Structures are given as C-alpha cells and as structure tokens.
Amino acid sequence: MNLSKHTRQIAVGDVLIGGGAPISIQSMTNTKTKDAVSTIDQIHRLENAGCDIIRVAVNDLEDAEALDQIIPAISIPVIADIQFDYRLALYALKHGVHGLRINPGNIGEAWRVKEVADAAKAGNVSIRIGVNSGSVKPAFIEKYRGVNPKSIVESALDEIATLEKFGFDAIKVSLKSSDVRQSIESYREFSRVSDYPLHLGITEAGAGMNGIVKSAVGMGTLLEEGIGDTMRVSLTGDPVDEVHCAKAILKSLGLRREGIDIVACPTCGRTEIDLIHLVKDAEDRFKALNFEGKIAIMGCRVNGPGEAREADYGITGGNGRGVIFKKGEVVETVDEAKLLDALIDLIERDHR
C-alpha cells in the first residue's frame, strides 16, 4: 500500500495514480517510435519486467502515426511525450493515447493549449507537467536568483495554472533535477503547497551504479517521507534496468511486495561456502518460483542462522554442509552442493 501524503487521484488508462493507489513504475522507450516493431518489442520486454506505464517520444507525424500500431499491440497504458507541436498531441489523443507529457509553455498560443486541454478532458486523458532544472522559466530564475527549488516549483505552478484556466485538472507533476538534493527539496516544497500527484525522478541520473545510487537516494528519501505517487528511474542504457531498479527501491521500503526478496550477507573472511555463486544461481532459478517473500542466503554460522530466521525461508552453511530454515525453524540439513535444490524443492512443495 502507498502510505504517501494525500494527493488527488488521476488515471493513466487503467492505472490509478495518487489518492492512496499503489506507486506505479514507469519507463520510456529508447527506440525510434516510428519503428513500431522495435518499439513494441521493447515494450513487451518492459511489461515482462513489471513496467506499469510506458512513455514514448512523439517528435513528428511518423511517430504519431506509429501509435496506431503500438497501442493495440501492448497491454500497458501509453503516454505520448510531446514537445512544442500541439498538433501531435491532438493526433495522439484522437488515436488512443492514455496520457500526455507536455509543458503548456512550450505549446505556444493560449488557443493551442486550450485545444489540447479540451481534447484531453473529452477523452479522460491525464497530462503530466514536467519541469526540470533545465526548463525553468527565465522570469522565475530572475525572481529567485537562480535555478533552485523555489524557481522550479513556481515554474510548475505556473504551468498548472495555464491548464486550470481551461478547466483541466487531471494533472500529475514532476520536478526533476540531476542534482539529488535539489530534486528532493523541490518535491518537498511542491508537496507542501499542492495536492496534485507527483511523478518522481532524478533526471539524467547517468549509467550503471552512479545512476542507480542517485535514483535510490533521491527517490528513496522522498518515498520514505510519503512523497510520490508514480516513478521513473532514468538510466542511460536498457530501459528494462530502470524497471528492475524501481522495483528494488519500492521493495526495499516495503512499498511493493512482488517476487522474491533475497537477503544475503556481503561475505567476509568467515564465509564458509561459495556464497557469491550461490546467490547468483539463486537469482536466476528463483525467477521461476511461484512465491512472494523473503529468502536469506547466508555464508557462515555467525550471522547466518539469526538472519535466516527473520526470512520466510533461509539457508546457511559451512564446511560442505548447509542448513535450511523455514519461519525460523531448522527443517533440513543437506550437502552444500544440494542446498539450493533442496530449498527450491521445499518452496515448490509449500506453494503448489
């Protein structure tokens, strides 16, 4: 359950956001949208990884036309990311898109914004306003003497006011920065002054470990404070990794219980079994298990039994032998080579 601060609720297709709904995971394709086959293939991979909502870039009419192939071929809602050309937003709305990502200030004259807002309202389609540290309006940079949480938040409120003027309020908001502290403070500030649902992210987080750490620290801090209704981890690389990272962040905070949570010691000089290979093998083999819960895989007699007893199931061992725990009770002792097989057999018997 999402224990976030109370926000109003909107929908992206059949996914509810805000108002106590579970925190949803989003990603964005990095294929050319006009290459519908490649885009559909990537979205299928993201669906399998656990993505709830997908965003695609719509840069021109060919991209927009590809939505006619993409939307019927997938099972999660699609958000069209539109920059500048209001006609692309209107096309996307007419052809079944479930959400828009726009900034009204980039659309142009007020009548263009009104056309988009009216069409979105008629189709029950929500809009995400996205302000990041690179898109703060110059007037607010001058007013607040730079790009900072106050200028970022006021830019977002100004964009919201533009849509509200046309009677549109099915809005969620992102306030992203590549600076983790700036992102955290911007989201905190917005949460204090508005109840619109928030899309969390650390923009341009980077690749690999650096991007994962920045995203986990930034979004994890906010989620622990009850701030955030949907999220995207922005990593340079395969977007499937974004989904895995987002799921791990939510699971670590107890906000999503899905699949198996493996607890494993970091190894030290006391480790008495080949723990590194055992954990890697377990991660691969556990994917096929019909079980959601915590499994501890420990490497010695010092921490092993205690940690294993805290999990639904656990194993620990040394000197060629291993012990299997279930709900804190020892249920079996086997050879180390058969330890993982015996654990999987036990779980499968329990959850047939």
Image (spheres, rainbow, N blue to C red):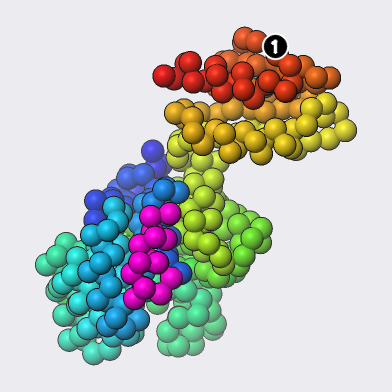
- Specify the amino acid type for callout 1: Thr
Residue that label 1 marks: 333
Q: Quadrant of the N terminus?
A: top left
Magenta residues, dominant SS class: helix
Q: Quadrant of the C terminus?
A: top left
Does the image show residue 165? no
Pinpoint residue 278: horizontal percent, then vertical percent. 70, 32
Give yes or no for residue 40 being in the magenta stretch: yes
Q: Residue at coordinates 65% horizontally, 36% vertically from top-left?
A: 281
Which of 245/191 is in front?
A: 245
Which of 98/306 is in front?
A: 98
- Residue 126, image quadrant: bottom left
Left or right relative to 235: residue 96: left
Does the image show residue 137? yes
Give yes or no for residue 155 being in the magenta stretch: no
Q: Residue at coordinates 48% horizontally, 16% vertically from top-left?
A: 349
- Residue 13, image quadrant: bottom left
- Residue 76, image quadrant: bottom left
The local secondary structure at tag 1 comes to strand
Q: Is residue 8 above or below residue 120?
A: above
Q: Is residue 284 above or below residue 102?
A: above
Q: Residue at coordinates 40% horizontally, 74% vertically from top-left?
A: 32
Q: Residue at coordinates 82% horizontally, 29% vertically from top-left?
A: 271
Left or right relative to 336: residue 243: left
Pinpoint residue 166: horizontal percent, then vertical percent. 17, 75
